[in-house]
Amino acid sequence: MASTSERKTAAPGRLLGFIVLLVLSIVMLMPALFMISTSFKSNAELLLFPPTLIPKDIRFDNYTTIFEKMELLLYYKNSLLVSGFIVIGTLLSSSYIAFGFVRYRAPGRNALFMILVATLMIPYPATMIPQFVLFKNLGWVDSYLPLIVPAFFGSAYMIFLLRQFFSNLTDELFEAARIDGCSEFRSFWNIALPLCGPALATVAIFSFLWSWDDLLGPVIYLNSNDKYTLPIALAGLSSKFRVVPWNTLMVAAIYTVLPCIALFSFCQKYFVEGISLTGTKS
Amino acid sequence: MNASKETKYFYLFVFPWIVGFLAFSLYPILTSLYYSFTDYNVVNPAKFVGLKNYKDMISDELFWKSVKATLYYALVSVPVGLFLSLVFALLLNMKVPGKRFFRVAMYLPSMISGAAMSLLWVWIFNPQIGLANYALSLVGIKGPLWLLDEHWAMPSLIIMSFWSVGGGMVIFLAALQGVPASLREAATLDGANFWRRFWSITMPIISPVFLFQLIMSIIGSFQVFTQSFIMTHGGPHYATLFYVYYLYQNAFVNFNLGYASAMAWLLLIVIMLLTYVIMRTSNRFIYYEGGRK
């Protein structure tokens, strides 16, 4: 009886929810759909108003001629190099450090962890000027080192996240390994890490996305054109032309976000897991 | 394992972070405090000038414009953005057909971020051929000049920021799924309506997540850079001169590192203070499972 009355009241609510969601989804998807459509347009069709959603003349070659218009492949390679090293550095260092915070009791541990959490709030602009001077004195300006090297000293955010995962591993597991003569480093590498595959995937995905997107760091440190990463190259594109070739710009933008979309579609599971951990267990 | 051995291993594992913290956080923060009292341009050694940079800040018209622009953006985009992401999450938490599709549709835009998003929205806001004015023309409104209009540039960027609420939405969605269904059912049986259930059950349980999101969004909104750099260059007429963009210009375009460091320190203090105030005042409203922390 209770269930039928509940269904009666819930049905109109659900229908309304469905309609609202449908409208919202269309609104949210429109910009992306027009991004794709613009990327396939001919130069002439770009100037049409109202803009056409389905191009009259679909120019697939926009996606190949871009490589003649700009050195997209070079920027791609640069971005992959920087993000790749940042991901490796973050994975290795953050998991190693998080393991220490979880596994061992030591004087100063809680204080250090408080400091770690506090550093989450430090805005990059607050440290970037002395960091720049430091890296300049080391002769690292116009190289990728200032962007990559800090990643090898752990990211507070990722340490925080991995610590949650590691705390779920039972002590017995490590005690058993210890009795079998397994060293502490081996129990980190051979026991903890393999058990935290999903967590590591989450860390890898998010550090990739963040570094792939970063503009301020590369803008500060990279001076020569052949070292630019994709975001700087995109920024340069927007001011390079007198008449803006929107189709070319959209093609470049789509190529840029493609790895992120691919990651998202293949690793949705890890997104959800990582998000629920970073968001809810704070 | 005895205590001293455990201490040894703790520091062996945490060592890289301590080095990183000293070199890339503590040392820079202290050094920038020092720089903020100097006249410094990288080439010549820093010259001590006392409080000059801070005094200059007070009389610098552009500095105040950048503060105003950033506050404008933060005060509108953060609350409305949080509200929207919570509403979207509540909608997606209902039992509706096509839920998976809706979730992807609303989250996908968050994947198109940074420089790519900025380029796309420059096109959308193009007054002649863009999507925004086309959409308005469908309902008979002649749209504004958007990014080219001093009064519309900031609203444009705020509207754009709502396109990325999917990120916050997914976090709220995860939190909502942690609300025990048994509690809601019991409340429904007791005759509690939707609002009552939301305020008395859902909201208290997700309140820690809400607080975390609030703080992170505020910190993020104070650090807008890409939009200024790509879409507006701070204009028109300094309407979108975001704080961090102006700081960047002072430091790396004008090489006025002392002044920029003073700005950086002010930003740090404001963010720390705001976080502290929010944490303190929210204590009463936040519900922690298993008692107060």
Image (cartoon, coloured by chain):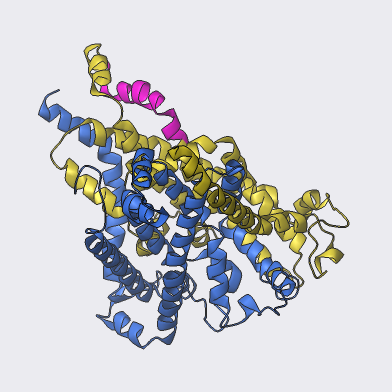
> Magenta stretch: residue A200 in it?
yes
A50 with respect to A240 (left or right): right
Percent coordinates x, y for residue A37 in the rendering: 76, 56
Give the overall secondary structure of the magenta segment.
Answer: helix
In the foreground, B187 or A188: B187
Q: Colour of chain A?
A: yellow
Residue at 59% of width from left, 59% of height from top?
A: B115
Q: State whether residue B219 is above or below residue B93.
A: below
Give percent across and percent down for residue A143. 51, 52
Residue depicted at 42% across the width and 37% down the height: A91
Image quadrant where residue A34 sits: bottom right
Q: Nearer the viewer, residue B200 or A35?
A: B200
| Magenta-drawn stretch contains A203 | no
Residue A280 lies, in percent from the top left, at 36, 45
Residues drawn in magenta:
A182-201
Q: Provide the letter of the chain coloured blue.
A: B
